[in-house]
Amino acid sequence: MRPSLIFLVSLGLLALVDSALLLHHHAQKENAAADAGLLRMTAAGLGLSDLCLATEARYTRHPAVTDPIVPFMDHPGAFEHFPSGSFWARPSGPR
Amino acid sequence: MMSFARQANIIDYSLSSLWRRRFKSLGVMVVFAGVIFLLASFQMTTKALTNAASDILAFAPEITIQKMKAGRQESIPLEYKEKLAVILGIRAITPRIWGYYFNETSGANYTVLGLDPFSMPLGDQLGEAIDTGALPLDHEAVLGQGVFAELAGGGDAVIFSLFRPDLSLKTFSRAGVFKAETNILTYDTLFMNLDDARDLFSLPADMATDLCVTVANPNEVQTIAKKIAALLPDTRVVTRQQIQKTYQGVFGWRSGFASICLLTALAAFIIFAWDKASGLTPEERKEISILKIIGWQTSDVLTLRFWEGVTVSTVSFVVGYTLAYVHVSFFEASLFRPVLLGWSVLHPALRLVPSVELGETLLILCLTVVPYLAATIIPAWRAAIIPADSALN
């Protein structure tokens, strides 16, 4: 068998795997859309401003209502030391 | 047709050539796929979080008012509500009491939230978000799934106590548990009525944590926010638009972790480029000389190198991108979780829907494959112009 044919067959197999993953992606999106109404209603009913992702520091639990300076507010000369702080960029825009 | 057969033959030869040097080729592909995996995983994770925030927080409070003193937020007097009565267009002002409760036993932080849901938009439907039970009455609380698992061990216990600031105990009954579908909002939350939250935090009767403002005409939010800021100069006024804007940028490339990912990827590419551009090995020189002796033209050698580059980068890209999807979708971005969640004791399962869009795929392609192909141009040209008798010398 020609090497190019083996290569094409291998690419075809990869494409099959990716097609299956694409189908999974569509199913996942449909599930997320089904939950979206409940989440929006919860956010509106409780007046929530943030996602519950990192709960270790108040500025990563509620970045939307936090000033950019807050990570350094613990005491004069304080360093930001929570690990999740390295994943979250500084909130932009005027407050 | 002849041209196609010629290309097919060159591709065959390039694949055979890669197979002859299979350990080196595989090494390059593994590193290359790793770089693509890292970049694509990061992009899929952050985009999924940004999309979720954008969709859900479109229903965040239209305006939130927080009192500031010495650069810090502090409790806001309820009398500020009366000051705002002069602003037309405000439909409702809802005081909220919320804050953090540190559980010393487990080291977890809970978010305690007290408000009257019936004064909030869609608040009358909030019962639908509660899995078992109902909205909290006096001395009752609705628990997020994470808090429920900690305080009641996920079992039948319905009574629990929390410490007030003076270390006296306040006892609550479990009114219900938020549905698992709302984990991304409520996992660490204890929801109770305003008076219980006030009692728990020992807050004076005339104070609240902040005020949520509902506006009659959504087009007037910015105008009303400006009027509030002018009327209450010691407050911070946060609009829904600002909340959404925060989440558009908070997971961006400028965060420290993303910079590290980007720098790692760049370093890997520099190594690639250096390896490719640092000259031909004697074996490669000999191979090309022999090809030229048997009649290959310079353009043929260039084509050969082109197909080698395309093969390596295509396979690496497809494998890296596929693994990135699997990592984010099936393993909840487990490589990033330790950094994203840090020392959090309570953290919900990240049911992320990876963002797979043509534009983003092309962006990763441009950031990885194009630089790789570009880095192989000069070595390919240097290889192609080797004199036919080079190997003999």
Image (cartoon, rainbow, N blue to C red):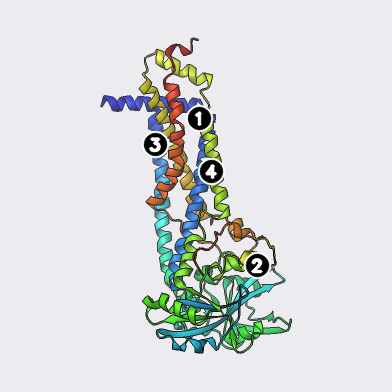
> Quick one: SS at disc 3?
helix
User: Which chain hosts label 2?
Assistant: A
**Both marks 3 and 1 on one chain:** no
**Both marks 2 and 3 on one chain:** yes
Q: How far is the residue under mark 2 from the one under mark 4?
A: 34 Å
Q: How far is the residue under mark 2 from the one under mark 3?
A: 59 Å
Residue where numbered disc 1 is placed = B276
Label annotation for residue A9: 3
Q: Residue B231 appears at what percent x and percent y?
A: 49, 82
- Mark whose residue sits in front, 3 or 4: 4
> Quick one: SS at disc 1?
helix
- Mark whose residue sits in front, 2 or 3: 2
Label annotation for residue A73: 2
Residue type at mark 1?
A: Lys
Label 1 Cα neighbours within 10 Å, binned few <14 / some 14-19 / many ≥20: some
Residue where numbered disc 4 is placed = B265
Indicate the quadrant where residue B225 lies. Answer: bottom left
* Quadrant showing the N terminus of chain B: top left
| Relative depth, front residue between B310 and A29 | B310
User: Which chain hosts label 3?
Assistant: A
Q: How far is the residue under mark 3 from the one under mark 1?
A: 28 Å
Q: How far is the residue under mark 4 from the one under mark 1?
A: 16 Å
Residue type at mark 3?
A: Val
Residue type at mark 2?
A: Met
> Quick one: SS at disc 2?
loop
Q: Please tell me whether residue B248 is drawn above or below residue B168 in the rendered image.
A: above
- Mark whose residue sits in front, 2 or 1: 2
Q: How far is the residue under mark 3 from the one under mark 4?
A: 30 Å
Q: Residue B139 appears at what percent x and percent y?
A: 62, 87
Residue type at mark 4?
A: Ala
User: Which chain hosts label 4?
Assistant: B
